[in-house]
Amino acid sequence: MSLIAWESITVLSTLWNYFSPFAVLKDASRGTVDEKAAAYRYNYEMRGCLLGYIRRWLWTGVLAFMLSAFFDSQSPHDGALHFVDLLATAPALFATVATCGIVVLGYAYVFLSCNDVPVIERRPVRAREPLKPMSWSDDA
């Protein structure tokens, strides 16, 4: 692998770690019940890092929105498609993705803050009744 390709992979992985909390939080949907509960408790304790990720998405989304508004103001608005219009679409798309990221991370933070007991442990356990032997007279 060439040096340029290696550097681009390094930059992409750095950006992924900067904007994504998946390296910090654990997957609470896999494993045994005890493993799920332990991962949920870990995520509950680490929920404070989500505010940092929300802040990052917020500021980059605001910057992208401002760039989009700037490029849109430079467009002549004569009905034809200009290069400046294309320049305005990329930051607008990123601002939309940032908005979605803020909503999802905000929901995760509120969910983890309001539910200190893992959802797995809050499920009611139903007692099983022993099966009754069936007789032919019960069918009718």
Image: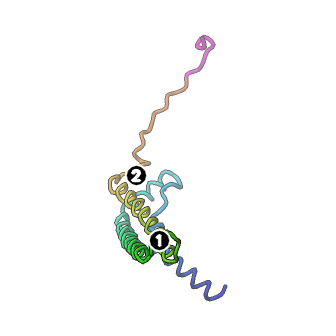
Q: Mark 2 is on which residue type? A: Pro
The magenta segment: 132-140
Nearest to the observer: residue 100 or residue 124: 100
Q: How is the image coloured?
A: rainbow
Task: Kindly identify which numbered label has been placed on residue 45.
Answer: none
The residue positioned 55% from the left and 81% from the top of the image is 10
Residue 94 location, x and y as percent? 46, 69
Indicate which disc, 1 or 2, sits on the residue closer to the N terminus: 1
List the residue tagged with mark 1.
Answer: 78
Local packing at callout 1 (Cα closer than 10 Å; few below 14, some 14-19, many 20+) is few
Check disc 1 and report its element: helix, strand or loop.
Answer: loop
Residue 134 in the magenta stretch? The answer is yes
The residue positioned 44% from the left and 48% from the top of the image is 120
Q: Mark 1 is on which residue type? A: Asp
Outermost left residue: 114
Local packing at callout 2 (Cα closer than 10 Å; few below 14, some 14-19, many 20+) is some
List the residue tagged with mark 2.
Answer: 118
Residue 117 location, x and y as percent? 36, 51
Q: Quadrant of the C terminus?
A: top right
Q: Quadrant of residue 64?
A: bottom left
